[in-house]
Every structure is written in structure tokens, then in C-alpha cells.
Amino acid sequence: MALEPAAGPAKGRTLVRNIGLMFSGDVDRPLLDADAIVVEDGRIAAIGRLAELRGRGPFDQEIFAHECAVAPGLIDSHVHPVFGDWTPRQNQIGWVESFLHGGVTTMVSAGEVHLPGRPKDIVGLKALAITAQRAFSLARPAGVKVIAGAPILEQGMVEADFAELAAAGVTLLGEVGLGSVKAGYEAREMVAWARKYGIQSTIHTGGPSIPGSGLIDKDTVLEADADIIGHINGGHTSLSEAHVCELCERSTRAIEIVHNGNERVAIAAVQAARDLGVLGRVILGTDSPAGSGVQPLGILRLISLLSSVGGIPAAQAIGLATGNTARIRNLDGGLLEVGRAADLMFFDRAQHSAGRDLLHSIELGDIPGIGMVMIDGTVRAGRSRNTPPADRVPQIIGA
């Protein structure tokens, strides 16, 4: 397990060149007409054609992409971390690093609910949230950005508790419904307090997932009005397709689809969003670790599912897990734009895929092969140990 101090972005200048396909992360304009990126001090400094960007040298390092694709690093919008790179739910060490090999560069906590003896008194739940926020901001497993510290709502919380949490740096609520606050009217008041102090909320949707949780139906979701409809396709058990589609239509909030949920309903939800013209509200997560285990390739598999069976073009499907999530979650990565964090995934068609190219292979249902992952301008992983081997992989040619 590699647990590293969050020392900040890499220093220096890197030229990434000979990119075959560049994904912006923006579902409305998913592909860029460019083949090179300049990274400076861990941030994207320029995007364009190599002939234009060569003159920005000298460079401390060059990465020759060998015509593979580059996209923003994937964002997992729904995970349940505890401390470091260990999950007691599956008693597994190194799970976050394994997600890195699935192209994930940022994870967002939906609550540190798997901590043995998780405190449910108000003082204890605030202490846990603040500790998790501090711990993951100061130390990154394998360099992955884990945005943590998401308290579970319990009865008896008052507005001052949310002000205190926000002042301490907490920016998230754990899944509404996993604690003792389950009624829509109770949740709505607390969600409003959280929003007042800049804390983003997610609501559990569907049947119970762990002992102590319960059914959160579509009326409760609508009444609570949380910022994100968490695992709209269930985690594990989903609401009916009709109710899920009704949520997509009646709510204006983010629509989160997870790997650890009902696949049929996932497809119904993304198609409903597409038909309503609100694909920009769809974000992706894994909802892991969970009873079904740890899914390092969960985001890639969701992209493939929603594209191959759901009919979402592959380039847009990638945007669901990058730019959409970055905008809704107010994150620094997720989009290939000047000034944003240089969190990059280098990938290509998996060897021997029936697809004629990367996009076609995803639309046929295959996951791509990852050749390199960069976070804040630092190469964190080479050829993935988890994906099938990519046809082409990038090469560091100068340092």
C-alpha cells in the first residue's frame, strides 16, 4: 500500500505529444481537435497541435503517446472509504491503488459508513467526518485524490452543527437515509442547512443496503431535494423503472448511476436523461467497497455498459465519468481545459477487441486498455495491471 503525503502538484514542464484521440470530458463537445498537451507545475497549460506547442519548450519531460487516446482521469462519484487504503467491508488493503489502475484519479465519499463502531452520536459523527476530511486531504493512497469526510445525518442535528462542519472543511454529506433521518421532511430541513453552508448532499435511493438503512422511495427523494440522487439505479435494490424515470423528469438534481446497482435500470435512467435533454446531469460511481466487493474497473465497465447497451456514444459516456462529475462536484480535474489539474488517462482499444478502433470497441461492450495514468502532472501508473492490455501505450522519452 502506497500512502503518500499530499505534497502538491509536480513541478516542471511536460509535453504530451502524438495523441491519437483527445477526449475533452464535456458531453456536449466530447472530442478535441488536438494532438498535444503542455503540462506546467501539475496543471494543463496548453492544448493544441504539436506544431503550435513545440515552441513553448524547453520541457523537463516528454511523453510520446504513440497515437493512443487521452482523456481526463475518471472520477468515481460514490465510494465508501474508511482510513488510508484499507476497507473493513471486505478486509482488503490497496483497493484505492487498484482503482488507479482502472483510470480513476479522484474519488468522492458518500459516507465513511463501514468504520467498525461508527459513532452515531452528534459529537462523534462530526468528529469522524472532520478526521476523515483531514486524513485524506493530507495523505493520498497511491496519489489518488479522495474527497472524504461525509457525515451521516442523525436525528437531533441542528443548524449550528452544519456551520461547525463547514468551518472545519467538510464539504459533503454522507448518503441521506443511512442514519436515523429517513423522513423526507426531516431530510429536507437538514439538506437545506447543509446547502446554506456549502455542503453538498447525496440521498440514498432504493432499498436498504446495510443493516440500519431502509427504503428511500421516489416521494422521499423528491421531498428531501438533495443535490444528488444517489445510486438512482439502486445500491443494490432499485426502485421501479417508472419511478426512476419519474425522478429524472421531476427533479432537477444530479442523476447518479452506479456499478453496484441494477444494470437494467441504469440503462433506463441514462436513456431517460438523454431523451429529456439532461445528459449533463448524469454522473457515475461504483458504490464500493460494498457487499459485492471492490470494483477497480467499475467506472470503465459502466461506461461500456451505458454505451454498448444504453446507446450513448462512447465519447459522451466518458464525459459522464469526467466532466459531468467535475462540474457537479466542483472538482479541479475532469475536463481537458487550460488551468485545470493535469489528471490524465492514456488508453486504447484492448488487444484483439472486435472493435475497429477505441470508440467502436467500447460501443461493442469491451473495456479499453489503460497504458498510463497521471495525477497533477505526475505519472502514477504505467500499463494497467487490471485492464486488458492496450494496443498502444505511451512512452516517457525524456527527463
Image (cartoon, rainbow, N blue to C red):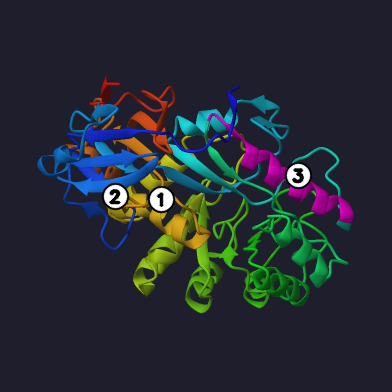
Q: Earlier in the sequence, mark 3 or mark 1?
A: 3
Residue 197 highlighted magenta (yes or no): no
Viewer-nearest residue: 151 or 114: 151
Labelled pair 3, 1 in contact (Cβ < 8 Å): no
Nearer to us of marks 3 and 2 is 3
Count the marks.
3
State the residue position of label 2.
314
Can you say whether 269 is above or below 42 in the image?
Answer: below
| Residue in the picture at 65% in, 44% down | 80
Q: Is residue 220 left or right of residue 5?
A: right
Viewer-nearest residue: 16 or 298: 16
Place of residue 132 in the rendered image (x, y in percent of width and height, measured from the top left): 71, 44
Nearer to us of marks 2 and 1 is 1
Place of residue 104 in the rendered image (x, y in percent of width and height, measured from the top left): 46, 39
Q: Give the range drawn in magenta.
A: 123-142
**Alpha-carbon span between mark 2 and mark 1:** 16 Å
Place of residue 382 in the rendered image (x, y in percent of width and height, measured from the top left): 38, 23
Q: Is mark 3 on a helix, strand or loop?
A: helix
Res 164 seen here: yes
State the residue position of label 1.
334
> Label 3: how many residues lie within 10 Å, few (<14), some (14-19) or many (20+)?
some
Q: Which of marks 2 and 1 is nearer the N terminus?
A: 2
Amino acid at dot 3: Thr
